Amino acid sequence: MSDDVGGRLRALRTLRGISQRELAKRCGVTHSSLSLIEQGKVSPSVSSLKKILDAIPISVGDFFTMDLESRDQVFYSADELTDMGSGEVIFKLVGANRASRALSFMIETYPGGSDTGREMIAHQGEEAGVVLEGEIEITVGGESRVLGAGEAYYFDTNVPHRFRNPGDVACRLVSCCTPAKTF
């Protein structure tokens, strides 16, 4: 068996929100034995491991193949968000460094009077967002509307669209679009 059985078991138990004492009670193994297994000081027999895993529950095969650690960065501080904007508009992209990103999740800031450009934008996918503060005029096809804080939008991005801040106060919104933009 793998030398890391204890570490995997501890990670899985923690992931499932089960205390060491609770798991020991569920599977009929003493708390001290389970503790020694998780510390890597004792290697369980296959039958003991199966008994422990049945109490979680997970199969022995899934236990050894389950990805318990994320390979990609999960949390981002404000200064780790990549600005993908141009001109005055700021697009802070969350997860820009993720190679297999399936969506673009952004915090957008439009200073008063700014916009995404005179030309309408169109691309494959969908986009949704919610205004956090200020106002934004969104034009999708032939339809326009000014949205304020708490209001939201959702549209197919193959329809030409444009964003414009008609006011003097900056507008901040959170948006998500698919597929992931490479900018």
Image (cartoon, helix red, strand yellow):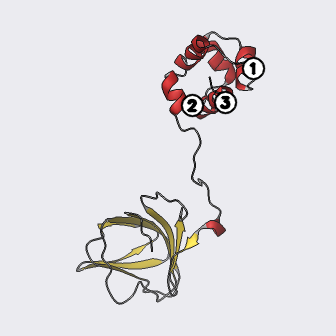
Three-letter amino acid code at the position of disc 1: Leu
Nearer to us in this view, 130 or 41: 41
Q: Residue 9's mark? A: none
Q: Quadrant of residue 25?
A: top right
Disc 2 and disc 3: Cα gap in Å? 18 Å
**Residue in the picture at 57% in, 31% down:** 16
Nearer to us in this view, 106 or 181: 181
The residue to which callout 1 is attached is 36
Callout in the foreground (3, 1): 3
Nearest to N terminus: mark 3 or mark 1: 3
Nearest to N terminus: mark 2 or mark 3: 3
Disc 3 and disc 1: Cα gap in Å? 13 Å
Disc 2 and disc 1: Cα gap in Å? 20 Å
Where is residue 57 shown, x and y percent of the image?
A: 51, 22
> Quadrant location of the N terminus?
top right
The residue to which callout 2 is attached is 16
Estimate how packed mark 2 is, as few (under 14), some (14 to 19) or many (20 or more) residues with alpha carbons within 10 Å.
few
Three-letter amino acid code at the position of disc 3: Asp
Nearest to N terminus: mark 2 or mark 1: 2
Q: Quadrant of residue 95?
A: bottom right
Nearer to us in this view, 127 or 131: 127
Q: Secondary structure at mark 1?
A: helix
Q: Is residue 66 above or below residue 183?
A: above
